[in-house]
Image (spheres, coloured by chain):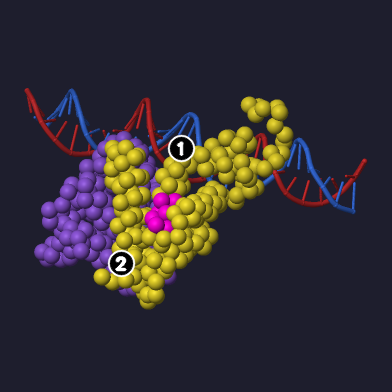
Chain colours: A purple, B yellow, C blue, D red
Amino acid sequence: MSRSKTRAYHHGDLREALVASGRKLLEEKGVRGFTLRECARRADVSHAAPAHHFASMDELLAELVRRGFEELVAAMAAEAGRAGAEPAARLVGLGVGYMAFAAANSVLFQLMYSQEAVRLEAKAADGAAEAVRSLLADEVEEALGHASGEVRQRMTDFAWATMHGFITLVLEGGIGGRDSSRALKTRGLAALAAMAETVVRSGSPR
Amino acid sequence: MSRSKTRAYHHGDLREALVASGRKLLEEKGVRGFTLRECARRADVSHAAPAHHFASMDELLAELVRRGFEELVAAMAAEAGRAGAEPAARLVGLGVGYMAFAAANSVLFQLMYSQEAVRLEAKAADGAAEAVRSLLADEVEEALGHASGEVRQRMTDFAWATMHGFITLVLEGGIGGRDSSRALKTRGLAALAAMAETVVRSGSPR
DNA sequence: ACCTTAATCTTGACGCTGGAAAGAGGCCAA
DNA sequence: TTGGCCTCTTTCCAGCGTCAAGATTAAGGT
């Protein structure tokens, strides 16, 4: 056996080990290169062991997606807190947290927002994505003051679309393919600033 | 043999047949469910036949991505043409074409803008994505009048990010999960209008 | 302390995949 | 007609996800 003799027959916390190795593997190999057997190998366990913790590969991926959303929401909230009390600044902060998470976990991020994710859990991630929206909706409402529900909805759409679109395009290379990450941050902040300004202005026209 | 006797030993135009069946298969099964053997089956050909036209599965996917970008650019240009001469309206038109293509080819669209695509061609799609950006950049320049290169760049980022982010979030379900497609179109147009307004205003401040 | 039960992990098998190698079939130019 | 070349088929390999069956250990009641 290649497996070290020091390891017990029972792993101890295989579920967590699989989540950890799975997450690394996902970033390394991409969605298509992700393999349950390689996950098991890295957790130093036989190829069929994961079945007792995740009924299928999709369930493991779903768990990764679920945790990704939790982290994303936490990153956004933390960055908004750091941004102070001004609604526009806090909106930018949410965007910074959003983009930072996406940049640091790009494959996972794309999986979270891909139709693969929709296929594999349908409901589970919906709640998680809803938390992202409500974080944005609350801040947009703050920035807008009193405004109709429709305006709030549309500005939330708009704010989300701006930050999501920008970072997605950066990750794919469409925006600033060969630019320094320093320059990219500046461009991202500029996009977020334009977004926040548009939101604020739509609350107090002209 | 299950293969019909009427088919000749030589297919005639297998490459195109594979592209066609591959494209349908991609939309049906998603990136992870895409299979070279199933493509071959649908083209009524043995599983190893594709190798003579595409050295690997990734090359077939790369070809699908390449053609996708061509269609995307064409759809944007057509819609902008329909929108008339007003820069703001044309910007919205580009967005409408963009979103319409994405909605009609959602899996392909997500593949085009995923890191899988980056992995599998690196260069090939870059030129194609560049065509999308230049379409936008030209229209932004028109809307801005005379403005610094930096402003033009940032407004192009912003415009692209808005349309890309909105349709991506719709496809994943983050925006308007259970809304009618009619309502969704209205929300999309609202986001595009906010974007176009922001671009135009940044050209002639206040 | 012991024995039962359930949980955890391993082994082995199945049908599927992508890819390589080798041979068969048909087109075309000499 | 014949030879060469391209296209396609067949066969084989290792790796994949998943299932079934057996081995090993932990936990808990007596």
Quadrant assignment, res B103:
top left
Task: Please indicate whether residue B104 sits to the left or right of residue C6 in the image.
Answer: right
- Badge 2 amino acid: Arg
Quadrant assignment, res A136:
bottom left
> Quarter of the image containing the N terminus of chain B?
top right
The residue segment tinted magenta is B89-97
Tell me the residue that label 1 is attached to.
Answer: B28
Q: Nearer the viewer, residue A28 or A2?
A: A28
Task: Please indicate whether residue B71 sits to the left or right of residue C3 in the image.
Answer: right
Is the residue under label 2 in contact with that under label 1 (CB below 8 Å)? Answer: no
- Badge 1 amino acid: Glu
Tell me the residue that label 2 is attached to.
Answer: B201
Q: Residue furthest front?
A: B85
| Magenta stretch encompasses residue B1 | no
Do the residues indicated by labels 1 and 2 lie within the same chain of the protein?
A: yes
Image point (63%, 26%), residue name: B2
